Amino acid sequence: MAQPPLSQRIQRLERELEVRLFDRTSRQVALTKAGRLLLPEARELLARSESLRAAARRIRDGESGLLRAGLPPDIAGDTVAALLTGFQDRRSGVELELHELSTTDQLARFAAHELDVGLIHHPCDVTGLELGPVLRRELGVLLPRDAEAAGLTEVPLAALAGSDLILFPRAGAPVLYDDLLTTCARGGYTPPAVRHGQGASFVRGLVLSVGAVAFSPRDARAVEPDADLVWRPLAGAPLAWRHSVAWPRGHGDTAVRAFADAATHALRTTADARPDTPTRPMRLRPASEYWL
Amino acid sequence: MTRTVNVPDAADRIRAAFADAGVTGRLHALDIDSGTQLGVDADQLVCTASVHKLCLLVALHDRAAAGDLDLTEQAECPPDGRTPGPTGLAAMLDVARMSLRDLAYLMMAVSDNAAADLLLARVGLDAVNRTTARLGLDATRAVHTFGAMLASVKEDAGPAGAQALADPHVVARLRALDPARANRSTPRDMTRLLRAVWRDEACLPEHGAAIRRVMGLQVWPHRLASGFPFDDVLVAGKTGSLPTLRNEVGVVEYPDGGRYAVAVFTRTAHTAATLPAADAVIGTAARIAVDALRSRQRDVPAAPTRVSDDLPARSTAPGRGAGRP
């Protein structure tokens, strides 16, 4: 750009923002302190405008461009690898930009038009979303090898009675947290204490040091068997993580559907996920106000 | 300018209560006499579900006031073709015959879907929309009967019936939960309607009194009313429910004369039908809002308070008291 128009643009921007961005002398131009403070914001704005253009390109021709996709942090590496391979096989032209995001963060980004598709945990508010099929990853229990219940091939919830439970902090997913504890209580297990922990090694450490138990999906079992810990399925499979692919309603183009297919396939083949069809009867009470 | 309560953390506390109960909630609360207000996403378009029965009730009284119908005229209620539902005529087996105003009582007291659709057939969908438009409820619109709403849920749920409603994949495709395609409003529109009803600005005083009476006869204790466990406080309201959707709009009246219109619209994360915490948080959120409006009221000196320009303050408040039997 020729210098005079550039200077004019800078001056216009400075007037608009009501701050001086550059110290100009006849010999050199340097950023002011205000300019330095605003620089990261400006860079972010430019990056956002790039992502807008990429999204527009993808919407325009559906073949090339960028698909912004979210995955929750608890998805195993094998599953991510299978998803990436599966997606490239289906849509070799589309660039996949993966973000590690919790379900709450994904929903916020859908609302802000900053994410095209994602793999989410249920339950969550699905207002304004379209969903792929719901899959369940059954949870088993991690317990110290010397625990009495470790001798069983399948552990009933009631056999955990008396053990403290290690669980993710409630604020992260209050509904899931309450649902897990309610299901445990219904199955005869009310932990004397619930201790909060999330990282896999931290949870293992707690299980070992305090003799507590924790729930985890089959595919998150120790890759190298831990001498002091065992993983056992729960009798009757009462607990599960439930996932589905989600995208904003009306925005399910071919790239989104390719991601949905690839994610569903990857979960089924690498994470032991199965279709979740409700089997329990739903007995509606009069206060429900509807009747089918 | 309408004054907005600036209790710094009331809106944050309401959001936190919604999150803690596993719901996404929108709320608007309005001091009926001063116009002081508080909102959380108060202009968000929401599905009304059975809350729209309140609009139908006001339209019924509009048409009665215009002489188009007589509230005591008898309606035949044959069992065949009745709109289904778990309460009132919708759950009864035999022929019934009752007045339009008694149908209105069943519609409001137990959310009777059959009574509502009999009234809607007499009043007309257009008349309901004319009434809400006349009252300035620009975002409020009825597009189908209660029977049509339930039929769409049944059709979208598929052959597995209610059981399929536990599947988020099924819930996400319910047309009845899409405000673009279903009966709709906003929290702010609903408190505006309630304020007009409680100030006798929606219709003549005798009609206003009849509306307040049946709203005070609603039987459900689990939502709005649960937030106000006080024998000397009146709660008059109307609920609305569909899979994952729980609403209530109503008026809370304190013995010192304070009257507050509150509208709460929620969607649960969980697909379960029985969720006591999700029902109760409607009362919890309403209580936080009303407490904030009342604390603001106490802070204000005795000098005349400035209220919104479009809603002039009145020194006397007609229609005080829901007139419970």
Image: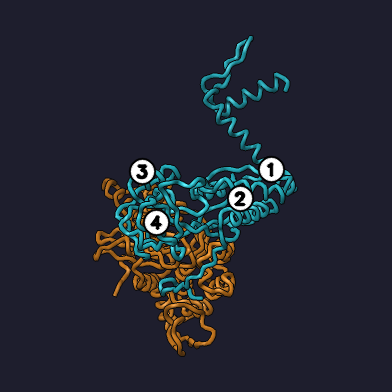
Chain colours: A cyan, B orange
Quarter of image, res B230: bottom left
Other residues around mark 3 within 10 Å, as few (<14) / some (14–19) / many (≥20): few
Which residue in the structure is indicated by mark 1? A95
Spatial distance from mark 4 to mark 3, Cα to Cα? 52 Å
Q: What's the amino acid at mark 4?
A: Ala
**Residue B37 drawn at (x, y percent):** 39, 52
The label on residue A150 is 4
Vertical placement of residue A189 versus B159, above or below: above
Residue B8, which numbered label? 3
Q: Are marks 2 and 1 on the same chain?
A: yes
Residue A117 numbered mark, or none: 2
| Residue A186 in sight | yes
Mark 3 belongs to which amino acid? Pro
Q: Are marks 4 and 3 on the same chain?
A: no
Which badge, 4 or 2, is on the more N-terminal residue? 2
Q: Residue at x 59, y 54 (%)?
A: A267
Query: Disc 2 marks which amino acid?
Result: Val
Alpha-carbon span between mark 2 and mark 3: 36 Å
Q: Secondary structure at mark 2?
A: strand
Name the front one of labels 4 and 2: 4
